[in-house]
Each structure stands twice: as structure tokens, then as C-alpha cells.
Amino acid sequence: MTAPDSGQRRWSDHQIEQVIGRLLQIGVLIAAAVVLAGGVLLLVQHGGTAVSFGAFRGEPAALSTLAGIWRGALALDSRSVVQLGLLLLIATPVARVALTLVAFSVQRDKTYIVVTSIVLVLLLYGILYGKA
């Protein structure tokens, strides 16, 4: 859609809400499907393995980077597939904020563009550089 001064319709608030709602639904469904597939794969690959509660073993280093998770998921490593699903779940609201920024840009709402840009930068900074 283009700006209203060009003679064409702009996005209505209802249309934006519908698109954002659909994005959230699809994002959560895809993430859930990936986690479910990873869980089934985990049971298939490691379901018969005896569990030792005597020693704590943290996550492998490969599961702490995006590249490692992606490589593992492509190799059908079950833990990597589950981790990818969780990353998709985390990325869904971030994508919502990015889509909202696009919508405000199309509507040329400068105040909301600034506020949404700040929120998006803070989210991305927290995800990429934040320490838990």
C-alpha cells in the first residue's frame, strides 16, 4: 500500500492487526512443529539411553551458537532441532516488532517509527549480546 496523498489506500489498522496476528499464529505453529519433530527425533535417537542424575552435563558448545544449531539441525541432531524450534519461538515476537515497524513506516507515523525502532534495537541487542 502507498501513502494516502498518492491517491491510493493505505493500510488500515484492522488490516495491520490481521497481518500481525497471522504472523504470530504462523510463527508459533512452525516453532511448535519444529520442537515436536525434534522431541520425536530425540526419543527415537536417545529414548533407550539410561539417564545418569549423578553428574550435571550442560549443553554442548554447538548448541550455544546460531551456526552450530543450524548445522546440527541440518544433520538431524535431535537436540539441535529442538533448539532451532525454540529459536523460532523467540524470533516470532521479534518479527512482529519488525513488521510493526514496516507498517508504521508505510503509514508514515514518525513517533511510532522511532519508538518501534528503539524497541527492535533493544530486542536485537539483548538477543545477540545479552548474557543470561
Image: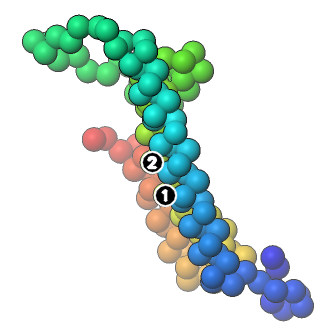
The residue at which mark 2 appears reads as 90
Rendered image: mark on residue 21: none
The residue at which mark 1 appears reads as 93
Specify the amino acid type for callout 2: Ile
Is residue 3 or residue 34 the one in the foreground? 34
Q: Does residue 107 appear anywhere in the picture? A: no
Residue at point 59% right, 75% down?
Answer: 17
From this viewpoint, which residue is outermost toward the right?
7
Q: Is residue 26 depicted above or below 11 in this figure?
A: above
- x, y (%) of residue 77? 49, 17
Q: Is residue 104 left or right of residue 57?
A: right
- x, y (%) of residue 92? 52, 53
The alpha-carbon separation of the residues under discs 1 and 2 comes to: 7 Å
Q: Quadrant of the N terminus?
A: bottom right
Q: Residues within 10 Å of mark 1 (few under 14, many from 20)?
A: some
Secondary structure type for disc 1 = helix
Q: Is residue 106 left or right of residue 77?
A: right
- x, y (%) of residue 89? 46, 47
Residue at point 16% right, 11% down?
Answer: 52
Q: Quadrant of the C terminus?
A: top left
Number of callouts in the render? Answer: 2
The reply to whether dot 1 and dot 2 touch (C-beta < 8 Å) is: yes
Specify the amino acid type for callout 1: Pro
Is residue 70 or residue 36 the one in the foreground? 36
Q: Where, by quadrant of the figure, is residue 22 drawn?
A: bottom right
Is residue 64 or residue 84 the one in the foreground? 84
Secondary structure type for disc 2 = helix
Q: Where, by quadrant of the figure, is residue 104 drawn?
A: bottom right
Q: Is residue 6 depicted above or below 102 in this figure?
A: below
- x, y (%) of residue 56? 17, 17
